[in-house]
Image (cartoon, helix red, strand yellow):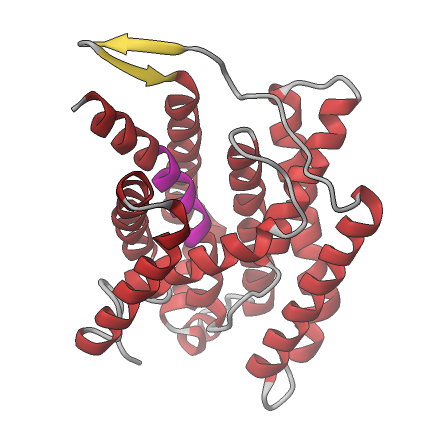
């Protein structure tokens, strides 16, 4: 029972980060209806930037906000320089997918050239364990869960209480109607891309504090985030959160009982079944 509880707690910790990642991907898709292939590369880059900042003596209180700001600026710049010029084109959605795939390959190439193929390690966010009711809980699991949950809460608060957040929601619901009332959709697209990059930065640092930093890690994360987003319903933040919890707990149990190598197989098997019976996802809709 204690081992099972430990597995569930670890699964919930991962679920919070997966939810953070999937919500960033869902946010971009919900607003622009395009898939951002560079998302995983932002995740990897955040880990490398954090490693550099740690190597010069900074700690987490400085590293996290600095990396988030850098990725926010990078995301905004990438949209302004590479994505916005494509939007007037007739098939701009397809062109954006190709452009973000190119960005991903460039960022991964830069990571490999600068940092090499070796794994980099970040210091743990916190250390030690806490015993509650006879159950031993990792402080790192609790810290990761709280940090990811706080970030998700801040995102939801931003989307519901700020002018830009409401503009993002308006464009996601009806871009033509948003333009009629004076909302600048290009500005909304830029902010959305930048916010998603910032969310990837937080997730990249949190997971790197448990695992390692690798230039290849972004593709695995991108795949997981896509599956979660598809299961939850493309563009649905709430669906992404629900799917992240379910899939992360499933991943933890499968890794515990069967083996970590089969978790991807189980995820995609579940996705295929869901697509047969509910192709729009848990909380998605057609149109």
Task: Point out the image quarter for the N terminus.
Answer: top left
Task: Give the image location of residue 78, x and y in percent.
Answer: 70, 60
Taking depth in this image into account, of 231 and 137 the one nearest to the observer is 137
Which residue is situated farthest in the front direction here? 258
Q: Position of residue 207 (x, y in %)?
A: 51, 36
Query: Going 61% across and 21% down the picture, which residue do you hit?
Result: 123
Q: Nearer the viewer, residue 179 or 171?
A: 171
Q: Which quadrant would the C terminus be assigned to in this image?
A: bottom left
Q: Camera-side residue: 138 or 102?
A: 138
- What x and y, as percent, mark residue 158? 43, 43
Residue at screen point 59% across, 49% down: 217
Q: Residue at x 73, y 41 (%)?
A: 118
User: What secondary structure characterizes most of the magenta part?
Assistant: helix
Residue 14 among magenta residues: yes
Residue 14, compared with residue 58, is above or below; it is below
User: Up-down: is 174 above or below 141?
Assistant: below
Relative horizontal placement of residue 144, taking residue 130 as reference (left or right): right
The count of marks equals 0
In magenta, the rendered stretch is 13-22
**Would you say residue 150 sits in the magenta stretch?**
no
Question: Where is residue 262, by image quadrant?
Answer: bottom left
Of 28 and 108, nearer the camera is: 108
């Amino acid at each position: 029972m204690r081992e099972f509880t430990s597995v569930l707690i670890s699964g919930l910790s991962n679920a919070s980060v997966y939810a953070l990642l999937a919500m960033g991907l869902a946010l971009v898709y919900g607003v622009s209806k395009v898939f951002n292939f560079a998302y995983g590369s932002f995740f990897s880059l955040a880990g490398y930037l954090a490693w550099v900042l740690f190597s010069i003596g900074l700690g987490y209180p400085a590293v996290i906000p600095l990396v988030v700001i850098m990725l926010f600026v990078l995301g905004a710049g990438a949209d302004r320089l590479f994505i916005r010029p494509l939007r007037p084109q007739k098939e701009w959605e397809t062109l954006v997918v190709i452009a973000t795939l190119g960005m991903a390959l460039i960022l991964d190439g830069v990571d490999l050239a600068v940092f090499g193929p070796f794994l980099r390690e970040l210091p743990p966010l916190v250390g030690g364990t806490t015993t509650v009711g006879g159950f031993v809980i990792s402080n790192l699991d609790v810290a990761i869960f709280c940090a990811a949950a706080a970030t998700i809460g801040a995102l939801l608060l931003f989307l519901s209480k700020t002018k830009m957040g409401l503009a993002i929601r308006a464009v996601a619901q009806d871009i033509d109607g948003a333009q009629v009332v004076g909302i600048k959709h290009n500005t909304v697209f830029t902010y959305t891309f930048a916010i998603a990059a910032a969310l990837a930065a937080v997730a990249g640092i949190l997971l790197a504090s448990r695992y390692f930093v690798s230039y290849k890690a972004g593709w695995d994360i991108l795949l997981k985030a896509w599956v979660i987003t598809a299961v939850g319903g493309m563009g649905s933040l709430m669906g992404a959160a629900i799917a992240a919890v379910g899939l992360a707990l499933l991943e933890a149990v499968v890794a515990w009982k069967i083996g970590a190598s089969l978790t991807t197989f189980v995820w995609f098997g579940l996705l295929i079944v869901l697509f047969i019976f509910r192709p729009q996802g848990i909380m998605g809709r057609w149109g």
